[in-house]
Image: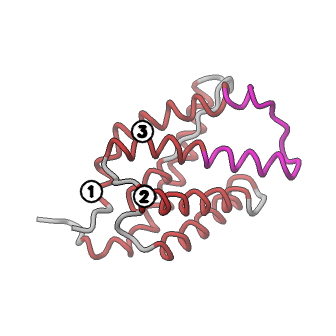
Amino acid sequence: MQLIKKENVKYYAPVVFFLLMLIDGQLTQGAENLTDNVYFANAHFMLLAFLMAVPNLSKRYLLITALIIGFIFDSYYIGIIGIYTVALVATVMMMYRFQRVVHTNLLTAFFGMIIFVTTYELIAVGLQFTFHLSNVAPLLFITKVLGPTLLFNMLIFVIFAYPLKRLFASE
C-alpha cells in the first residue's frame, strides 16, 4: 500500500524542495560549527532531490520551481537576489541536458551529483567574485569549501539517494 500516490509528485515536490532547502541551511551551519569555521561544507540535499526528480517531472515545471526556490534562498540566506537563483536554475538545466545523454542509474547519478555540486558552487562563487561580493583565493576555495562540500554531499548521496529516488519515482 502506497501512502502517497505517485501521480501527485508534482504537488508535493515544491514543498519537499523547500523543506530540503531549510535542512541544507541548518546542516551547513552545523557543519561550520562542528569544524569551528575552519571548513565550510555546504549540504545540498535540495540538489540531490532535483537530481532524483529530473527523470519524472517536466523541464518547465522544475525550472520554474528552481527559479522560485532560488529566489527564496537568495532572499532568506544572503539578501542579494540572483546569485543562487542563477546557480540553481543553471544546474537544473544542466541536469536535464545530462539526462538526455547519459543513462541514469544510482552510480551515474553519484558522479553526476559530484559534477552538479561542483558546478553549483563554482557558479555561485563566480557570480559573487564577478560582482565583488567576495574575494576568495582559488586554492582557499578548493581546500576549505569545495573539498569538504563534495565529501559531505557524497555521504548525503550514499545515505539518502535511494529514498529520494523512491519519493520522486513515477511508477
Q: Name the image quarter holding the N terminus.
A: bottom left
Q: Is residue 124 magenta?
A: yes
Q: CA distance from mark 2 to mark 1?
A: 22 Å
Residue situated in front as seen by the camera: 142 or 84? 142
Q: Which mark is residue 101?
A: 2
Q: CA distance from mark 2 to mark 3?
A: 25 Å
Lower position in the chain sequence, tag 1 or tag 3: 3
State which mark lies toward you, 2 or 1: 2
Amino acid bearing label 2: Val
Asked if the residues shown at circle 1 and circle 3 are in contact, with their CB atoms under 8 angstroms apart, the answer is no
Q: Which residue is tagged 1?
A: 166
Q: Which residue is tagged 3?
A: 156
Residue at the image position 46 percent from the left and 68 percent from the top: 14
Q: How many marks?
A: 3
Lower position in the chain sequence, tag 2 or tag 1: 2
Q: Is 42 left, or right, of 160 in this rendering?
A: right
Q: Residues within 10 Å of mark 3 (few under 14, many from 20)?
A: some
Secondary structure mostly seen in magenta is helix
